[in-house]
Image (cartoon, rainbow, N blue to C red):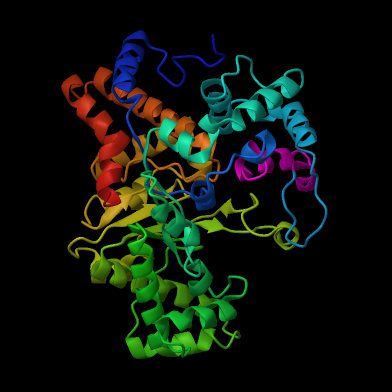
């Protein structure tokens, strides 16, 4: 017997619960489409055993360590690497015990459900993590991680992953992806083009990044060679499986300047002295340039807007980026996206997937936009809203205006490999619960629901991401 309820996330009303069970059963074992995420391609290139439970579940996962940090646990004590080279805890058993002592902090959070799912279904544990079970769980997990059945490629196949997209910088040489391709292994691990380091003037080392990047476009640091470098790098990423780009901008602002003005803007930001408005205008122009390139080369464009990244300067200096201090902020889409949509909103074959951390924009802005512009798809609830409540709020806010078929399906957007099946399981359970609710309230025929479950599970993501 496990410690997770078989009916978790299903409605409490008996008729709706029965419908949800039946709908979920249709897709429970469907393949996983993971078209956007941040797992490490080195895992699959080298196929070495994962080191231990702490390095698998805690150290790389900002969902986990940000919660513990919020209650006063030092990131160093969780083994989170210091960007400045400072000392951190190296004893993984001590890190795991510290995690177990604080596991109660995750009650009713999606992280608790994801971790419980992995501990029970993947590692076969029959008790929830606690200070009392910490050592036994640590030893049991580590014993399994040492076996061939728990190496990255074996887990990829066990998870029934049809495709897994990672995300790499425009400056990455993609050596791990080349090694995966050349190995002959049939697992489909593809890359995604993420050019923030050479598009965002506020990114650390931006000027040096652009100077190095322009070598891919002929060497000279000019607007023309810079654009040529993007074309070249996008083609290289596509040659290693990429079907999409991704852009993590603080806003969704776009601009559509004449090329002479854009060239002058490029020269301005490359001085390193551009003011904030000019830096924002450059990001805005580059979203439109990326859309122009997507229309030409067919790569799907994703915009993850609305996060004030690295909110704590102290944490950024001490630990670097992506340490849980990215915070949602209010985000405009109607005015912000208009320049791009005026130019490319009806372009044949162009797919633009929008994500937001600003839930107030769901029904007011995003659903009406996606419900009319042919290029637009809505990405699933992201990050802080990747949860039962967040998914339900999203479904209830956008479906009546955008329908189901203007959505991009589900993606897990994770760095934590073992959470992938759990996250997709949660999404499937939520979708089953939502469709059951539509049936019992007379808004959907039961005969339609099975097809929609398949679409929400695999079909929408396959088409939106051109997989």
Q: Is residue 73 magenta?
A: yes
Question: Image quadrant of residue 225?
Answer: bottom left
Query: Which quadrant is home to the N terminus?
Result: top right
Residue 287 location (% of width, % of height):
39, 69
Report which quarter residue 300 is drawn in.
bottom left
Mark yes or no: residue 389 visible.
Answer: no
Is 373 magenta? The answer is: no
Residue 433, percent from left and from top: 36, 23
Residue under the point 58% across and 26% down: 108
Question: Magenta segment range?
Answer: 57-78
Q: Residue furthest right?
A: 87
Is residue 256 visible to the viewer in this orientation of the structure? yes
In the picture, measured across the screen, residue 230 lies left or right of residue 44, that is left
The residue drawn where x is 46% and y is 56% is 179
Report the front residue among 219 and 368.
219
- Percent x, y for residue 268? 51, 88
Question: What residue is shown at x 73% (from left), y 23% (from top)?
Answer: 134
Q: Is residue 351 above or below residue 164?
A: below
Query: Which of the 4 image quarters holds residue 431?
Result: top left
């Amino acid at each position: 017997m496990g410690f997770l309820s078989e009916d978790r996330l299903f409605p409490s009303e008996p008729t709706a619960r029965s419908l949800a069970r039946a709908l979920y059963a249709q897709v429970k074992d469907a393949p996983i489409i993971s078209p956007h995420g941040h797992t490490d391609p080195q895992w699959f290139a080298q196929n070495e055993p994962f080191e231990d439970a702490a390095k698998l579940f805690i150290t790389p996962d900002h969902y986990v360590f940000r919660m513990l940090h919020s209650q006063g646990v030092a990131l160093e004590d969780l083994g989170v690497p210091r960007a400045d080279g400072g000392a951190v805890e190296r004893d993984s058993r001590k890190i795991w015990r510290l995690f177990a002592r604080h596991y109660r902090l995750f009650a009713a959070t999606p992280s608790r459900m994801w971790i419980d799912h992995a501990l029970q279904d993947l590692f076969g544990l029959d008790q929830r993590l606690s200070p009392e079970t910490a050592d036994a769980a640590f030893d049991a997990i580590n014993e399994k991680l040492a076996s061939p059945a728990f190496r990255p490629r074996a887990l990829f196949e066990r998870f029934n992953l049809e495709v897994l997209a990672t995300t790499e910088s425009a400056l990455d040489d993609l050596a791990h992806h080349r090694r995966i391709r050349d190995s002959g292994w049939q697992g489909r691990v593809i890359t995604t083009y993420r050019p923030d380091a050479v598009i965002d003037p506020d990114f650390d080392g931006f000027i040096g990044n652009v100077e190095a990047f322009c070598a891919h476009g002929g060497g000279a640091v000019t607007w023309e060679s810079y654009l040529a470098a993007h074309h070249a790098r996008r083609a290289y990423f596509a040659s290693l499986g990429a079907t999409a780009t991704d852009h993590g901008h603080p806003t969704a602002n776009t601009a559509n300047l004449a090329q002479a003005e854009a060239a002058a803007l490029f020269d301005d930001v490359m001085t390193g002295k551009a003011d904030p408005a000019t830096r924002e205008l450059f990001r805005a122009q580059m979203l439109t340039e990326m859309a122009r390139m997507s229309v030409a080369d067919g790569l799907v464009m994703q915009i993850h807007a609305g996060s004030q990244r690295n909110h704590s300067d102290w944490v950024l200096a001490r630990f670097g980026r992506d340490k849980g201090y990215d915070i949602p902020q209010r985000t405009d889409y109607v005015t912000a996206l208009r320049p791009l949509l005026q130019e490319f909103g009806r372009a044949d074959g162009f797919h633009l997937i929008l994500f937001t951390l600003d839930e107030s924009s769901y029904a007011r802005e995003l659903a009406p936009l996606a419900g009319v512009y042919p290029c637009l798809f809505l990405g699933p609830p992201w990050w802080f809203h990747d949860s039962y409540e967040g998914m339900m709020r999203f479904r209830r806010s956008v479906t009546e205006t955008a329908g189901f078929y203007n959505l991009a399906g589900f993606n897990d957007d994770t760095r934590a490999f073992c959470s992938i099946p759990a996250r997709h399981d949660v999404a499937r359970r939520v979708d089953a619960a939502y469709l059951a609710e539509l049936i019992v309230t007379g808004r959907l025929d039961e005969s339609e629901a099975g097809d929609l479950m398949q679409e929400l599970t695999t079909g929408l993501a396959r088409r939106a991401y051109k997989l």
